[in-house]
Amino acid sequence: MTEPVTLASGHRRFGKHSRVRGITENTSSSQSFSGKKFHGSLIMRIIFVALTCIIAELFIFNASHWLSASYQPIADVQVTYGSGLKSVGEGVYILENSDEATITLSHIGQHVDNIDIPITRVTTSNAIKANDYPVPRVETFVGRSDSSLHVSLRADDAVHTLGMELPQRVIHRSVPSSQVIRLHLAGNTKSIVVNIHEHPGTELEFSGPPRVNVRAPLSMNPLRLAVYVLLLILVGAWPMVNKVWRREQDLTPVQRKTIWIGAATLSALLSVMVTMLVLPWVYMRMTQWQADFEYQSVARALASGHSWIDYPVADMLTSMQNPYQSDLRELMKTQTQQPILFDYVFYDGKYFSYFGVLPALLFFLPYHVITGGDLVPWKVILILGVILAMLSMRFVYLCFKRFSPKTHVLVQAAVGIAFMCAVQPVFYLSFLPTTYSVPIATGLCLALGAACCWFRALDYRDSSRFRYGLYLVAGGVLCGLIVGCRPQLCAVALLLPMLLIVQKLSEGSRVSTSLKAALPGTLVAACSAVLIGIPFLVWNKIRFGSLLDFGASYQLTVTDQRAQIDGLSKVPYALWQAFIVPASVTDQFPFLTSLSSANEHAGGYQGFFYSEPALGGILFWFPLGLLMFLVLSAKVRRTIGGSKVALIVAPVVLSMLTIIVDASSSAYAARYLCDFGLLIGIASMFTIVTVSGKMDVRTRGHFNIVLLVLVGITLALNLWSIVMSGRFAQLSDSNPSLYVMLQQMLSW
């Protein structure tokens, strides 16, 4: 009896396993088929996108090439060069008079569809006097031959028999498509005048005279090709991104860390890219701004064992009753032809620097001592930009980890990248890697480093007193070092007591108990900050006789800093420019420009305001900051709690105070965006994490979409700001070939 039972049992087991194996095999086969189908579909999508890009490049963006095949050539055109262009060789001309720098094409007598200006070289030059600078100069004459050529046309046609002025165009030798200008004229044209808008002394070289109705070149724009490649990468990566988005809960800690590292790397690369795009090793060598060499001169002074700048003081400057009166000083300089260092501090008959000394101690002095040479600021900015990007990502990571860990990791990383646009709006520091950017970038790195240390201190408040104290002291030390580069950024110190108080309140403690608990940690950090900051105050005492005098009052700049009258009247204009006003929008490339009211009388101010171009308010460049207004809702305030509302409101108030102090004491400048941009970024981050942390899963999903949209707008605006005109070192001047290439990328 047992054997049949065993057999039956065995048969049952065999049958069961057979069915399982069959199901497994079928499932495996189905998954294999599904996988092949998926990969096949992905390949088809990639091929489709690639073909679309090829067709767009060949037949849409190169439409002028195909259309110009039907243009009627015109051979017998008379070309005359104006008296403002002096011929110095075959096809080579020196521009002597801008008003008469013209090329006239006459006796045309036919319909004109385009004109070709075959430029092969545009050389501009800057004469630099070595004795006008506080550090030795290798070059006394610096030029570049890759400049753009700015031209405008005056043409007649059947409607405008007396001729009409056409808008200015920018052409470049390395972008052949830019040299062929498409015209839209009515009927026949008799003559065309090419007006050249360049400075006297510019050398021009042409491969031949201008021609009309030529065959436009078949042009493959490298930037468009890069966009196509990026598009293909996005299409290929989309399934993986979509999988991560839908199954975020299945990600391992290593995978999450990889996403953060990738986002931080991308952020750092953006900073590096912006600096490299302006070709600082070329453009910054052509500078005639003396203050761009200020840190090098400070390093040389420190190496010599004194605090003042080794530069002879003009007799005219010491004889003036008020050397800080800018217009009279410049007049005397012109009359006497004696060199004066502009934007330096002049005190007690010597030159000093009003920039914080810490960057000189960290970067410029060691470089000078080791090499004997002078470190250029753009290399320092390149390093600080990477550090700043990494610390920005770290700060955002810590914010989400403490207040909203359930937020999707991709959203967290995206917000981290956008946060850098609050720390340095319009990529100001990376785009303008000069002396002025160095102390701000150094201070921002220290401020973010201090904030990250204090966030980490909270993790050890109850578990390890040693680590808790260590992070408090480290943050305090970094905060104290800010005094040596950008004292305004010390406002970040308020973050520590607020974090300590909020942590205790979230544990259920009473307000009075939380205040008492926050006091010891705050004092530890404050004491370490004061001890580190004292040497920099002593440095002030050595130079100007006062611990709190940083020397700005004695600055030889565009206005007398000691004679500010009714400084508070500038505050409304400064707040408007700093927070709200957008950049100016134009109807032609690059579509964004600095504010037209950005000169000395901004916003119609009846008095001197400032001379630096205004670029727009922080809320225009950092739309994520608009989320701060959520705290105006009583429902939101009740949901997140009063202490966390204070975390949001306090940085905003501090940012406004920073602007008020800057504007009332001197003025508001575009670079001050970085002074208070960090505070607005912090307030925005606290809004995002505290509000998101209180949402249910469905609402948080909708909020994530809103965040991603705002991140996209933020990154798009700030990346496009690289091209905007009117800012210092605008791309059309610093990297003209790239500028023209971008312009041609959007034309067909």
Image: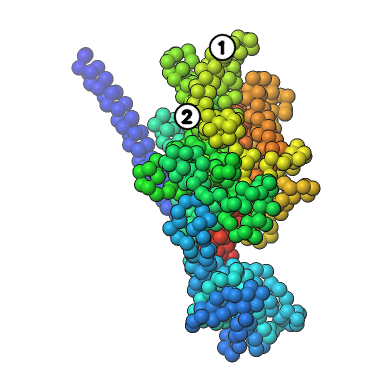
Q: Which residue is mark 1?
A: 517
Q: Quadrant of the C terminus?
A: bottom right
User: Crowding near pointer 1: few (<14 within 10 Å), some, many (20+)?
Assistant: some
Compared with residue 720, is residue 299 higher up or lower down, i.e. above or below? above
Q: Write the residue at 30% across / 30% down.
A: 18
Q: Quadrant of the N terminus?
A: top left
Quick one: SS at disc 2?
helix
Query: Which amino acid is tagged 1?
Result: Ala
Q: Is residue 23 visible?
A: yes
Query: Which amino acid is tagged 2?
Result: Gln
Q: Is residue 24 left or right of residue 177?
A: left
Q: Quadrant of residue 154?
A: bottom right
Q: Is residue 529 left or right of residue 29?
A: right
Near-viewer residue (339 or 379): 339
Q: Write the residue at 58% across / 29% down.
A: 547
Q: Which residue is mark 2?
A: 249
